[in-house]
Image (tube, coloured by chain):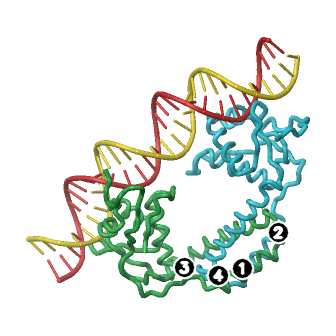
Chain colours: A green, B cyan, C yellow, D red
DNA sequence: TGAGTGTACTAAGCTACATAATACACTTAG
DNA sequence: CTAAGTGTATTATGTAGCTTAGTACACTCA
């Protein structure tokens, strides 16, 4: 399920890249399953195919999907990107820890947050909803589909 | 000391905002000390005064500095932005924790990282350090703190 | 063969960023 | 008071990135 947020100041292709990678990471999109075609997803989201193409290009470069010309785009095996993703996550965690420390947060508070977070049931969606990635509830201050 | 990184893809004013706020947070710039003027910092960094002005505007909006028209820009008391900064740090830490968890990092690994980080001596410069931002002019030495 | 796929390219419009050049009101030192 | 230094605002210009639009080509598969 992808929703374009036009209040988001980031470029569209970046939003799409982020949301698709999240869907892949959390398991909502199974390995080797097929992604919507450039043209069909563009139509569903009411944006230009070039923008989708750019998002897919980025996802392929990041290792989350692979492309078969003439056939489509497919989700890469978890083992392919797992390592790199974990490395990024570790770095971001370290940065956040340094910032937390400099902000005056106590070590105890940080440890408690970690415990709490790992106790919680953070969505690791079950691979049962392939279907539509688009949600037609987008209203950029105008009616849908109309671009001058 | 501020260095412009032209390989950085972010806007200049954002780089400057970030580095100045870091200097303020870590204590390299004392509360109520005077920042370089818009024009002088612009000249030292060889960029346009408007860009510095924009950075200062952002810093003021974030609460890190306050402005006295006709006099200059000054570092805000720590207590003014401490709370908001801690709140941001906490949120970023939570995001990083969720990401770490989803990447497969174990709770033990995360706890170890936190311990390690808090054991380390992460630069929290003590007031009195050289406040030089480029090569010049921060300490007027006689600032009787006149602010609103 | 034809439909669907990824891919590449050009052109145009829009926005953000950065610079340049002024201009004005204010504060302070003289 | 004057003059220098300060923040602030404005307009104009150039550049770059994002997005759309339209077209085109090579590939895969029923």
Measured from the top left, where is residue A45 in percent x and y? 36, 66
Asked whether, in this view, residue B23 is left or right of residue A55, the answer is right
Q: Real-space Cα distance between discs 3 and 4?
A: 11 Å
- How crowded pointer 3 is (Cα within 10 Å; few <14, some 14-19, many 20+) is rated as some
- The answer to whether the residue labelled 4 contacts the one labelled 2, judged by CB atoms less than 8 Å apart, is no
Is disc 3 on the same chain as disc 1?
yes
- How crowded pointer 1 is (Cα within 10 Å; few <14, some 14-19, many 20+) is rated as many
Which image quarter is the N terminus of chain A in? bottom left
- Residue at image coords 76%, 80%: A112
- Residue at image coords 50%, 74%: A22
Q: Real-space Cα distance between discs 4 and 2?
A: 21 Å
Q: Which residue occupies the foreground of this view, B88 or A28?
A: B88
Q: Quadrant of residue B73?
A: top right
Is disc 2 on the same chain as disc 4?
yes
Disc 4 on helix, strand or loop? Answer: loop
Q: Give the letter of the chain under mark 3.
A: A
Q: Read off the residue under disc 1.
A: A114
- Residue at image coords 75%, 80%: B111
Mark carried by residue B105? 4
- The answer to whether the residue labelled 2 contacts the one labelled 1, judged by CB atoms less than 8 Å apart, is no
Q: Which of marks 3 and 4 is in front?
A: 4
């Amino acid at each position: 399920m992808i929703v374009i947020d036009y209040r988001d100041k980031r470029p569209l292709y970046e939003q799409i890249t982020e949301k698709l990678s999240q869907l892949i990471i959390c398991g909502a999109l199974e390995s080797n399953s097929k992604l919507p075609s450039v043209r069909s997803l563009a139509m569903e989201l009411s944006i230009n195919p070039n923008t989708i193409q750019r998002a897919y290009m980025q996802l392929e470069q990041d290792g989350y999907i692979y492309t078969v010309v003439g056939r489509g785009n497919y989700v890469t095996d978890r083992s392919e990107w797992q390592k790199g993703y974990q490395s990024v996550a570790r770095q971001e965690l370290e940065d956040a820890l340094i910032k937390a420390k400099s902000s005056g947060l106590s070590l105890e508070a940080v440890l408690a947050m970690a415990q709490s977070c790992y106790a919680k049931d953070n969505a690791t969606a079950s691979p049962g909803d392939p279907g539509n990635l688009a949600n037609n509830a987008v209203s950029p201050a105008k009616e849908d589909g109309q671009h001058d």
